[in-house]
Image (tube, helix red, strand yellow):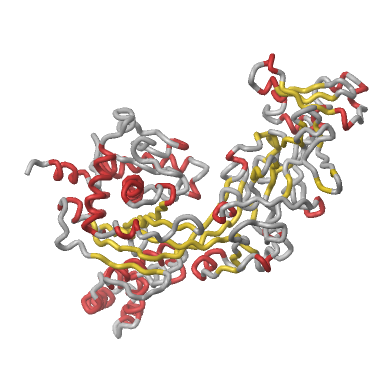
Amino acid sequence: MEKIRHDLRLSETISPFGVGAIVDIRGESLMAPDTSWWDTKFAPEISCERLMTRLGAGKLRQPPAHAGRASRETPALPYWRFPAWRFCERCAKLTKLTGKKKGKWSNTCECDGMLVPMRHIAVCEKGSHVRDIPWFKWAHRGPAASKSEAVRFCRDYKALRFHKLAKRGEGLGSLLVKCYGCGISRSFAELVAKGALTRDGIRCEGRQPWEPKSSVKEPCPYELVAVQRGATGNYIAQTISALDIPEERPPSVEAGDKIRGHALFAKIVADNGGPLAETGAQWIAQDLGVTPETVLAVAAGEENTDGEMLLDLKDGEWAAFLKKLDAGRDGSGSDFVVDGRSLEGVPGPTSLIKRIGGIGQVHRVREVRALRGFRRHDAEAALIGVDLGANQKYEPVYPAIELFGEGIFLRFDEAELAAWEAQTGVQAQAGILKARRADSPLVGRLDVPEPRFVALHTLAHLLIRRLAFASGYASAALQERIYANSDRTDKTAGILIYTAAGDAQGTLGGLVRLGNPDKLIPLLVAALEDADFCSNDPVCIESDRQGASQLNLSACHGCSLVSETSCETGNRLLDRQLVLGGRNVTGLLEGVLAEVRQPK
């Protein structure tokens, strides 16, 4: 084992350089093995009950960190050299052996040239496995190999060379592997064709590079495909994050408990939908301030139970934010401090203020991010867990980090939002994205693009772009969390924009200061002004197919897109028209700019 010291940001150990990812360090290409390889005594455990309720059994552990200069004895994470095959940049010799010089491991060739990792690796199409391409075997296969006995019986393993021929241009045809023992050579153009590795007898080993061959219990049935080592599709991390807040019971759950405790509830259940049940439901509704339909739904057992409602982490967060907004100034001093602010008497356009139900200045919030697993090559490929050790079924270890930050919470008026999204044109506009999401391989990883989600999501992006100028934070340091769901008993309609970082930026105060309604309303208006004129208009505003998998409508880099690390959906499901309006659709905040621009 060679000890190479190199620092990564703590957040990078979750994504993009988490378990199973390739990272380039000092000319080496390394891969992070699963958490069963970690020395857990140097990986502190993190507590977050809300997140563990979602993940199930296991532990959250943070990678070891240090302050100052690292030494050889500084606790660190292990990494596995991958790909093992490398070529010498001086003599072009192709090998997967690493030598020693004066008793130390060396990344240099016998000729003192530096060894460079090979550019291509083999990835399983559906199993999320990866392996080295056996270059000696591949070079001695193919149509030319079958015509020569010298090629078929060649065993000169040290005679392999990797060449780039300038006279063949810049494509894959200019790259070739040649054996100087038997004289055969193959171009990389033969490597990337469909089924090429299978035809050469190269199969998936059904494992990750750091796993021993004995760990494979069944052969992998899927084909291998040759890809570039740095391709983004080689590693698709699946992370999950939760805000560390008091787990509040949603209003519908509390209402259900009150209904069940009412003296007339037993009679309604006994009547089982008869005339007494309807009359009793009206009496209970009047006493408790709920609707008769809610009472009858509870009696019929049709409401969401406590466990179902809290299955989604955002449900509990939404309930906690609503409680904080109603409480006003927060003096708790905990890891979740939110001051609820009223919009009464705040100057600004009426068409905007009437749609906002409340503002929260989030002075302090703790977020815990964990890596659940990863996929390779395909978003529908098998999910590989982060702990592949013997204890993975009972108590797996999830890599996680805790981050502290601040933010702004915006709650929108449910009645105003419901009336807007009931319009036919609004539903038709969002229906375009719904249909494309249903046909996308990312369907299980993206929220349902109902009108409220697309509008609030786009507004969050517009506000992030504007806040980057006023808050003192870079836009990439800002995160979004969208609460927009109408199929719950407790409908949600709000956005949280916050910053959380474990090292460089966190709670500097510049963001929460802008959560003051007197400052936030002008910022919202400015964000709408920015979005009204895109440098790519009229192409952008008239477009209905932009972005990855065409999952954006009127949204591009000139107006609505932000850093992908800031967005929950990777810059997808955006549309300016559902915010500002268009030819066939009414925007959620369509009248705001017209009101602002009226001469006074």
User: Could you tell me residue 571's position as x and y percent?
Assistant: 43, 43
In front: 391, or 112? 112
- Residue at 6 percent across and 44 percent down: it is 600
User: Could you tell me residue 145's position as x and y percent?
Assistant: 85, 22
428 relative to 73, above or below: above
Q: Quadrant of residue 58?
A: bottom right
User: Could you tell me residue 482's position as x and y percent?
Assistant: 38, 54
Question: Is residue 251 toward the left or the right of residue 306 in the image?
Answer: left
In front: 250, or 284? 250
In front: 88, or 341? 88
- Residue at 56 percent across and 64 percent down: it is 55
Asked if residue 380 can be seen in this view, the reply is yes
Q: Quadrant of residue 43?
A: bottom right
Outermost residue, bottom direction?
A: 263
In front: 512, or 351? 512
Outermost residue, left direction?
A: 600
Question: Is residue 359 toward the left or the right of residue 40 in the image?
Answer: left
- Residue at 8 percent across and 41 percent down: it is 599
324 relative to 188, above or below: below
User: Could you tell me residue 567's position as x and y percent?
Assistant: 43, 48
Asked if residue 458 can be seen in this view, the reply is no
- Residue at 50 percent across and 45 percent down: it is 442
